[in-house]
Amino acid sequence: MSFKRKIAVVITARPSYSRVKTVLAAINKHSELELQLIVAASALLDRYGSAVNYIEKDGFTIAAKVFNVLEGENLTAAAKTTGIGILELSTVFDNLKPDIVVTVADRFETMATAIAASYMNIPLAHIQGGEVTGNIDEKVRHAITKLADYHFVASENAKERVIKLGEDPTMVFNTGCPSIDLAEEVINSKELPFDPYEKYGGVGAKPDLTQGYLVVMQHPVTTEYKDSRKHIEATLEAVYKLERPTLWFWPNVDAGADGTSTGIRAFREQHQLPNVHFFKNMEGKDFLHLLKHSDCLIGNSSVGIRECAFLGVPVINIGSRQNRRDRGNNVVDVSYNLKEIIAAIQDSIANGKFDPSNVYGGGDAGQKIANLLAELPLQFHKTISY
Amino acid sequence: MSFKRKIAVVITARPSYSRVKTVLAAINKHSELELQLIVAASALLDRYGSAVNYIEKDGFTIAAKVFNVLEGENLTAAAKTTGIGILELSTVFDNLKPDIVVTVADRFETMATAIAASYMNIPLAHIQGGEVTGNIDEKVRHAITKLADYHFVASENAKERVIKLGEDPTMVFNTGCPSIDLAEEVINSKELPFDPYEKYGGVGAKPDLTQGYLVVMQHPVTTEYKDSRKHIEATLEAVYKLERPTLWFWPNVDAGADGTSTGIRAFREQHQLPNVHFFKNMEGKDFLHLLKHSDCLIGNSSVGIRECAFLGVPVINIGSRQNRRDRGNNVVDVSYNLKEIIAAIQDSIANGKFDPSNVYGGGDAGQKIANLLAELPLQFHKTISY
Amino acid sequence: MSFKRKIAVVITARPSYSRVKTVLAAINKHSELELQLIVAASALLDRYGSAVNYIEKDGFTIAAKVFNVLEGENLTAAAKTTGIGILELSTVFDNLKPDIVVTVADRFETMATAIAASYMNIPLAHIQGGEVTGNIDEKVRHAITKLADYHFVASENAKERVIKLGEDPTMVFNTGCPSIDLAEEVINSKELPFDPYEKYGGVGAKPDLTQGYLVVMQHPVTTEYKDSRKHIEATLEAVYKLERPTLWFWPNVDAGADGTSTGIRAFREQHQLPNVHFFKNMEGKDFLHLLKHSDCLIGNSSVGIRECAFLGVPVINIGSRQNRRDRGNNVVDVSYNLKEIIAAIQDSIANGKFDPSNVYGGGDAGQKIANLLAELPLQFHKTISY
Amino acid sequence: MSFKRKIAVVITARPSYSRVKTVLAAINKHSELELQLIVAASALLDRYGSAVNYIEKDGFTIAAKVFNVLEGENLTAAAKTTGIGILELSTVFDNLKPDIVVTVADRFETMATAIAASYMNIPLAHIQGGEVTGNIDEKVRHAITKLADYHFVASENAKERVIKLGEDPTMVFNTGCPSIDLAEEVINSKELPFDPYEKYGGVGAKPDLTQGYLVVMQHPVTTEYKDSRKHIEATLEAVYKLERPTLWFWPNVDAGADGTSTGIRAFREQHQLPNVHFFKNMEGKDFLHLLKHSDCLIGNSSVGIRECAFLGVPVINIGSRQNRRDRGNNVVDVSYNLKEIIAAIQDSIANGKFDPSNVYGGGDAGQKIANLLAELPLQFHKTISY
């Protein structure tokens, strides 16, 4: 019989997996912890990059899979996906009986994990609370903070904010962001250690990458999902006009994903794009290598705010998705405007790389979090501090 | 074609209906509002008092009914009930297309309303946020605050707390508690205007009520649900020993409801209770009349904290369920201890009634809320204030 | 690595467990089979007798529990329970990856097992198809036959009927009913080997059982659920008037269960029942002992048709629930009529016991079924035979 | 107050809508019927052709929309989609209170309609039972027959088969297939009355259609879904080699849809297709015009078996999807084999059109069905006939 603490971590999307991979590894190695890995939602789906394949390839054992993405072009589907998630995760928790459940960040469906655990009186740990972005993610993020018992935040500002939200300060820990742990491994990379076309396939042109290249990753914004096609078109037009080698990554699942995807497909059918290659996904570490050697990252991914700060890679951050998140000086903010985007990219290439910033931690978050999960008192009862 | 704002109010339990009845009436009468009343969860179920029957009898039109209570003796059922609620309410909202959704208080399943509305970008109003109790309800209540766009709170302390939670102060309104609106109508009652045995049936003895009587309403506490049977037994024993006329109300649905109910049933089979009558439920106004003329209220119902403050009725508040909620001086707090309970009841009868307190508002909350629903800007986008 | 065939059996109710207990035991003992026992629906719930407790006490390992009973007083709840069952069982099957799924009999929620398995291309075995009763169970039963790949039926008539339904005759096996396997173990019992009051508790009077006694088990009939209270009252009245020692068993869950339960509770409050004891449930074998030594069984349980035929116990079968099911000569059919019921009971006591009948098999169904599960070709593709 | 019978028809996919459009129109016009149209599942989704848009354009009022398609690349999603469908449709039925529910054909998710209605004791009518195909559709189709109370079948063979399944012969009606009603309107068409490229957009080349053209519509086969990519490649290769003007229609949703879709996308990226245009969907009548003037239809759509028989259009029917369905002499069956497919197409073009066949009815099914819905006794209780 095992007396290890059972730690259930629920992964619902490709980027969440990349973010907490070092946490999973540290739990797996910890002598007093047993990992119960649950893979759900878009992390299981081919058209969002099948994170599940990378998880299995990385050697993690999956305790349960939960298919709960409801298909639809509107926000109803996001709500329903969350409802089904609660229904199913509560059965999974009931059967696995974890001591602590861990939920990651602020995607809409992470609320399912938070509700199932907190309603079942299972202590809930939240990674990456306390940040500010100004969209629906923020409602979700702070609501999860109010459901969670332990808070593993990524910056000093985030820590302060969680405490202001009335949480017990002794349960709020600035561990840094575990995504930085991976970036720490590539920060001294001298050249791209793999051929992305060969290793990841994808479609489109195969521009030469030796003289620099752009990377694009732009997701739909939930509160603006009706405009997601228009938004993506400004970026497409900018890339088309710049005629530079470009590696473009498909967006992850969200209400409006189809607007963004449809926009990209339609643009490709109407334009020749002799310098652009499209990828569905890439292992986290390879992606960081790719960013490290790129001229800049374009779009609205949190990778630009977070890992790119640590790596010193310039970022053209488009639109409202990362609003008010803490950022280093590597980030230039622009609106969904063709001219602004083009000018920012050109400036950025002219100015070159930045010095590393520690705003999101120093590369040991995974280990810190595992240690806390082993040591913290098991509790699910709390009250607001004021 | 109507240009009235469509206001969807979701009622999930008998006590929630009593609490917002004057809000519903004020919306119905308001020339610029159209009420879309959705009745769900235990409000539809016979064994929790069929609030739906009272709603229909009161003349409200029901736009949709949603059966979503999953049966079970553990907390898993509470989580699943919420998941099913999201799944179904999102369809209902998708078909009714409300301009604003209103969710009431802090029962676990109200989270389903909050998530469905906020995920679908429908402005969400929350009645009765910002209070403090120290149990699972508190997690739910504050998480809903972080999802809601408008806050109609019941006291100055609650207002201050919601603002501290980072909400925009211009969207936080101390309207008072709408349950007080009903109490306002009975505060000058001189005698019980109906025969409760005749009007409401119920089972057990029919003690004479003319020389005073006790009222008992004790719900299971979610975070202590395994002890719910033991907890109810202390109260049963006290009532049994006191041998005074007593009117006992069944608890509402919750994880653990069966522990409480089973405890009551078992006690009845083992003891003669010649002074106790059991009711399943009662119309809100009649219940307030009953309280007004009682010696005291015993248990852990929020009615004791709220309406009884306004009515000046003494309350023996047992256990942790109302912890840290604002209260008038009519409340005596005791633990689940037979001697404490008996002593408190005896003192209370000896001391008599209290002066009215305005801690939860002045009786016009329903009208204030309806006016705000008609005037507030329609918005679902917010960001934390710090 | 195991090369045993994984056989998932889904138990959704107390009577289903009793019925297939010998199948479970035979699978467990079979060297080429691995049992994956899934306990769901009312089999997990206290107020329907917690079959799960007996299952664990009998030493079976449970692979997954699924809470899916939606609460409600109408038929909507039966439909929803089935929908949730599909949602959850498909996740369970996806994680357990059984080679064959077994579903039992014809309760409404067994359809969830049948749909999840057949839609997922898992070979489906159905126990007890081909029988005729004339109520909603019949729609369910024959629809499951059309979804199932293997048919383990309980009588020659049933076998013929399944083949007429267009099934491949080589996949239809008259194994007898596994419930008879248990009856085989008690057929030579000379006296009641336990004190039912002491072993099973229950409530009410404790009449002396040494001079004979009646056993009552009456379930609501789905297609007549609005009348379930009236129906049960005829039986209650008959038992009340006969003034004989009576052991009464609560009904299992069904739309309308509350009508039946409410009827019983109300009758008890209005009448003294000095000869009646009420049980919630009893282990299958003990129940068969109890029947074996009773004067007769009253109600509409299939136990009367099936095990009582083998045991030679007289049965007063009330109403339409067992209509057209094959029966031995131990059964007298009556309508919901007080006089008829009383007369039939009196005749029955006067006439005494019957000779055993083999109409539902010879006591080796469990072993036969396990052997077939090990040997049958794994297939999920079929076409109608005409 | 209306005394019209309320007829709820649930449409879950584009082809089902086309098939029953004349039934909907006839119900709408019938003085004693009120149509309650429920649009669900893939009929609401853009990537399966948004049947909902055509429905609204055709002037039908939609009583409720239900999003219930769970996303996934495996059969689990089909099961879950059905489970969610039951959960939601039971709420819809509970609120709309139809007198009869109508379910169409045999797609997996139609089972949700059948179960919700039959479990709720609402009389259930099934259109197009009794046919034989030999795949999972057949399990679904015959199971629905066993749940349905009225059967509106499309051929004499189907009628005979439903009766053999034990249904009451007085409740089985050969109305013909309502899809033929539409075909009846185009049978005398002399030329294509619209420009398909202009009216329906789509992507790819725009070959000249005046000298004849091929039409392709090939769906994945549920029981073979792992091979769906390989299967579609044979057809793609054949069309590529033949170099004839070709109009290709995307498949509808199914487990494996992504295999088929992915196959088509990949083929397009690797090959120039100067003669092929791709459509997502087309209004039923326009599609029939298109077929009427084509050289032949290629694939596995039931349109080939059904409408094309009536129109006399040659059909190259590939693979097992239409196995054992009644067919006219216009159909040539081939396997998933490049050479066979090419040869069959060439022969077919050489031989030209066929005489019309009445095997699936004479063009008045919609009216016949509406009349029956108005006249049949309302009943939900049945028993097998043998």
Image (tube, coloured by chain):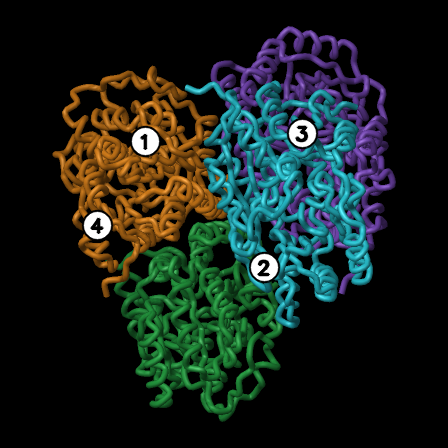
Chain colours: A orange, B green, C cyan, D purple
Check chain identity for marks 4 and 1: say if they share one.
yes
What number is the disc on residue A183? none
Which marked residue is nearer to the observer: mark 3 or mark 2?
3
Q: Which residue is mark 4?
A: A158
What number is the disc on residue B65? 2
Q: Circle 3 — which element?
A: strand
Q: CA distance from mark 2 to mark 4?
A: 42 Å
Q: Which quadrant is the C terminus of chain C positioned in?
A: top right
Instruction: Name the side, left or right, on which B312 lies relative to B290.
Output: left
Check chain identity for marks 3 and 1: say if they share one.
no
Q: CA distance from mark 4 to mark 1?
A: 27 Å
Residue C159 vertical position relative to residue D147 in the rendered view, above or below:
above
Tell me, yes or no, if residue B149 can be seen here. Answer: no
Which quadrant would residue C153 be assigned to in this image? top right
Q: Between residue C138 and residue D378, name the one nearer to us.
A: C138
Q: How many marks?
A: 4
Residue name at image x 43 percent, y 44 percent:
A227
What number is the disc on residue A216? 1
Which residue is at the far bottom? Answer: B190
Q: Which residue is mark 3?
A: C152
Task: Specify the subunit that label 3 lies on.
Answer: C
Q: Position of residue B49 (x, y in %)?
A: 55, 68
Q: Circle 2 — which element?
A: strand
Q: CA distance from mark 3 to mark 1?
A: 59 Å
Using a 10 Å C-alpha cutoff, classify the residue at mark 4 as few (fewer than 14 neighbours), some (14 to 19) or many (20 or more): many
Which quadrant would residue D200 be assigned to in this image? top right
Task: Specify the subunit that label 1 lies on.
Answer: A
Q: Position of residue D294 (x, y in %)?
A: 72, 20
Q: Which mark is first along the chain, 1 or 4?
A: 4
Q: Position of residue A287 (x, y in %)?
A: 28, 27
Task: Specify the subunit that label 2 lies on.
Answer: B
